[in-house]
Image (cartoon, grey):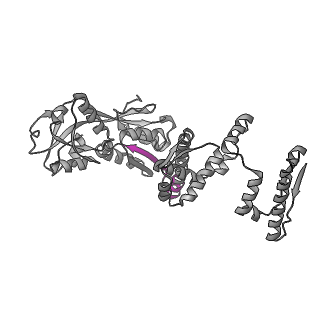
Amino acid sequence: MSIKCWSPPLLSRSHELGALTSASKLMCSLEQNGGLLPRLGIGFQIGGLSPRILRNPVASNAISSRIGKQTMQEKTQSRSMTGTPRTNITRRIDLTTLRLFIAICEEGNLTRASQREAIAPSAVSKRMHDLEEVLEVALFERHPNGMALTPAGESLLHHARVTLLNVEKIAVDMAEHARGVRGHVRMLANLSSIVEFLPDDLPGFFRSHELVRLDLQERPSADVVRGVEEGVAEIGICSADVSTRGLERFSYRRDRLVIVVRSDHPLASARDVSFADTLDYDHVGLFATSSIYLRSQYTAQQIGKSIRLRVHVPGFDAVCRMVQAGMGIGLIPDRAFEVLSHGMNLTAVELSDDWADRELVLVARDPAGLSATSQLMLDHLRLPGTKPH
């Protein structure tokens, strides 16, 4: 049995508000009389109200205050007890919300995320609250100085990135078909491969595949592996020194590290030098996450000394310029030195340590699952006859 208070659609707004007020008073009266309705098994329903009433904040608050809302925990517990599946999730989560969620994760702060995405903080906060309501889990731990992900948030971050990447692929593929470009390859590569080898290797591929477009991004080797794992790119090139975990890897190229010095430096006349002998001089180091810097740091620790680091720089060309300016000596690959050092009055001294001989590898999640164009690129770059290892 139910009691319904109807507000005819043709009534004026004042009549509609009056109907809602009367219904609320009736509900209060019945509640105050010892919970008469529940004892009689009578359910109370307000039906037929105009949509304008329901969109009105005052009216909505009045309704919600009388009817009540389950908390997120209660909903989750209810679903776990009844086994009721979540339905229509795809209709209630939009791409903008996922993009804002990723921005908060990357910035660690809602305000910075809203500034980055040019959306009011209050709107971002509302979207995150609604997202948690839809998913019925807490995605963030909120702290005075920022927001940290819960385990559920970590899981959603992975899915959100993959989802947006797939949507981006759709847009790119459709745009390229419209322009007559028939293929697209996404690749991450470390600095060494981009400076030393790819400028020589890629032109031959594009002569045979003129309508393929390459999206190439430079990353440290460890980030190359992570990016391929997370689906940011299909192919990666990194140092063989880093762990490639579950990725398939193929031999790509080899290089050798050399010590770069000014022609008037005490080491300039040496045929080769051990890394230990360089630790008595100031060093110009690559960025702290580069595989070359990490390997040299590890070696210094094994020797029991520290690197006399004068400055960190972002690339091989900057290393050469700083060495030329007398800031110290540098450690870079031999091919990079050949390309970048012309006219700088610098000398490359071979490093005698075994680890100076390096291998670069190609990595992919599942070669069999690559797009046709990415498979062509992988086959072109890998050394003839090499197998995954």
For residue 310, side relative to residue 15 (left or right): left
User: Is 105 positioned to the left or the right of 389 in the image?
Assistant: right
> Residue visible at 17% across and 50% down?
342
Give x and y (percent) for residue 195: 29, 46
Q: Residue furthest front?
A: 33
- For image coordinates 87% across by 56% down, the residue present is 4
* Residue 193 placement: quadrant: top left
Residue 185 part of the magenta-drawn span:
yes
Residue 371 counted in the magenta span: no
Look at 28% across and 32% down and name the residue there. Answer: 298
**Side of 262 relative to 70 (left or right):** left
Image quarter where the C terminus lies is top left
Percent of width and height locating residue 160 = 55, 46
Q: Pick whichever, 299 or 381, lies toward us.
A: 299
Please, is residue 375 above or below residue 167 in the view?
Answer: above
Q: Residue shown at 20%/48% (left/top)?
A: 320
**Up-down: is 330 above or below 178?**
above
**Residue 238 % position (x, y):** 36, 38
Position of 80 with respect to 333 (left or right) is right
* Residue 51 in the image, given as x and y percentages of width and height: 76, 63
- Count of numbered labels shown in the rendering: 0
Residue 124: image quadrant is: bottom right
Q: Of residues 206 and 364, which is closer to you in this image?
A: 364
Span shown in magenta: 172-189
Query: Quadrant location of residue 27?
Result: bottom right
